[in-house]
Structure formats: C-alpha cells, structure tokens
Image: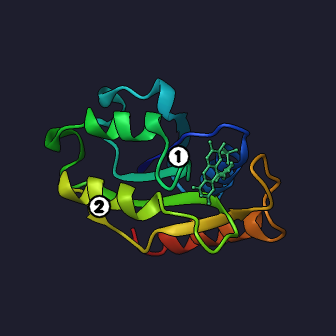
C-alpha cells in the first residue's frame, strides 16, 4: 500500500501529527508538505491523509489552492481521510470537513471519519495525549484499508 500524508503547518504542530500518523501506518507511507505537492505525487497512491491547521475558520490558503488544482483524474477512487489542528474555543471554524467535502467531490472514497487534534495556543504545543491519539487514529485507519 502506498500512503501519502499531506500537510500544511505554520508552527510545526500539524507536521508533528502528520509524522506520527506516518510512523503508525504500514506499507510505503510518507509525509509531504502541501507547498511541495505536485499532482503527479498522487500517482499510484492508494491512501491520502490530508491535514491542515484551521486558519481564520477554514483550511489554509495553500491547502485550498492545492485542492483547487486537483482534478478528478488525480483523486478518483483514492481512499482518503482528513484532519485538522485547532484551538479549544467555542467558535473555531473547521478545516477537516471542508477538505473532506472537496476530496469527495473529486471522487475520493472516505475511509473513516475526519479527525480534529487540539493545540494549546496558536503556536502549540499539542494537548497532552494528542500525539498518541494520532498514532491510534493511524492504526484504526490501517484496520480499514
Ligand atoms: C492566522 C491564524 C488564524 C487562526 N485561526 C484559527 C481558527 O479560526 N480556529 C482555530 O481553531 N484555530 C485557529 N488558529 C490556530 C491554529 O489552529 C494553530 O495555529 C494551529 O493548529 C497550529 O498548527 P501548525 O503549527 O501546524 O500551524 C489560527 C492561527 C493563525 C496563525
């Protein structure tokens, strides 16, 4: 299985989650910053896990730009899920569900519920337990592929 964990990250928190996910996936799995993503990176990929911090109630500009440049050919039939990092506030907006809707519209096949991971402040750190939660989530994804 070829898995690609795409992420954007301003302060390294979403990147940390992405790396923990990769460490808990079987097969050929790697992380890739969305800023370096080319559509050809999705060739022969079976599973895409895509993460972004919430910035201003939504996914980052780089994340949405990259998604808007994908075609159905790039993503059709690929299993996927999404995650975001966010602060614990009553109003926090969303990135994971907007990203999932976009990938689903391109023909991606959702493999599991999208997931939120919490940071203590704008620059982190992650809340206690969130690194372990990322690993557990990755293992749960593995049980579904
Ligand atoms: C410009 C900016 C806007 C943000 N807006 C939100 C927001 O709307 N909702 C939220 O939960 N967190 C918001 N945050 C906090 C980010 O979620 C937090 O910085 C991020 O999870 C850290 O991950 P990163 O290091 O991968 O960027 C914002 C942060 C920045 C810098």
Comparing 28 with 83, the one in front is: 83
Classify residue 125 by image quadrant: bottom right
Mark 2, Cα crowd under 10 Å, few <14 / some 14-19 / many 20+, is some
Residue 1 coordinates in the image, percent (x, y): 41, 52
The residue closer to the viewer here, 110 or 23, is 110
Q: Is residue 64 left or right of residue 122?
A: left
Q: Quadrant of residue 80?
A: bottom left
Query: What mark, if any, has residue 138 been given in the picture?
Result: none
The reply, left or right, for residue 128 in relation to residue 62 is: right
Residue 109 vs 69, above or below: the answer is below
Task: Kindly identify which numbered label has been placed on residue 29.
Answer: 1
User: Which residue is labeled 2 in the image?
Assistant: 101
Q: Secondary structure at mark 2?
A: helix
Q: Residue at x 55, y 58 (%)?
A: 84
In the image, taking residue 75 as reference, residue 90 lies left or right, namely right
Can you say which quadrant of the picture contains the C terminus?
bottom left
Q: Residue at 66% across / 37% down in the picture?
A: 10
Residue 101 image offset from top left, x and y in percent: 29, 61
Residue 90 at x, y = what percent? 63, 75
Q: Is the residue indicated by label 2 positioned so its CB lies within 8 Å of ligand 1?
A: no
Displayed quadrant of residue 109: bottom left
Residue 25 visible at all = no
Q: What is the CA distance from the residue labelled 1 to the residue labelled 2? A: 23 Å
Give whichever of discs 1 and 2 has the lower sequence position: 1
Of marks 1 and 2, the one in the foreground: 2
Q: Residue 30: in sight, yes or no?
A: yes
Residue 73 pos. (x, y %): 15, 40
Q: Decide: marks 1, 2 in contact (CB < 8 A)?
A: no
Bin the neighbour count of mark 1 within 10 Å (Cα to Cα): few under 14, some 14-19, many 20 and up. Answer: some
Label 1: element kind: strand
Tell me which residue sits at (28%, 54%) in the image.
102
């Amino acid at each position: 299985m070829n898995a690609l964990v795409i992420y954007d990250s301003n302060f390294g928190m979403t990147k940390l989650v992405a790396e923990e996910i990769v460490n808990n996936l079987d097969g050929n799995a790697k992380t890739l910053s969305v800023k370096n993503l080319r559509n050809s990176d999705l060739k022969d990929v079976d599973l895409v896990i895509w993460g972004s911090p919430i910035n201003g109630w939504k996914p980052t500009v780089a994340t949405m730009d990259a998604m808007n440049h994908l075609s159905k050919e790039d993503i059709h039939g690929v299993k996927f899920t999404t995650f975001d990092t966010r602060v614990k506030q009553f109003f926090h907006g969303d990135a994971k569900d907007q990203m999932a809707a976009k990938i689903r519209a391109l023909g991606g096949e959702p493999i599991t519920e999208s997931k939120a991971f919490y940071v203590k402040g704008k620059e982190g750190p992650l809340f206690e337990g969130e690194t372990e939660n990322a690993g557990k989530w990755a293992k749960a994804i593995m049980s579904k592929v």
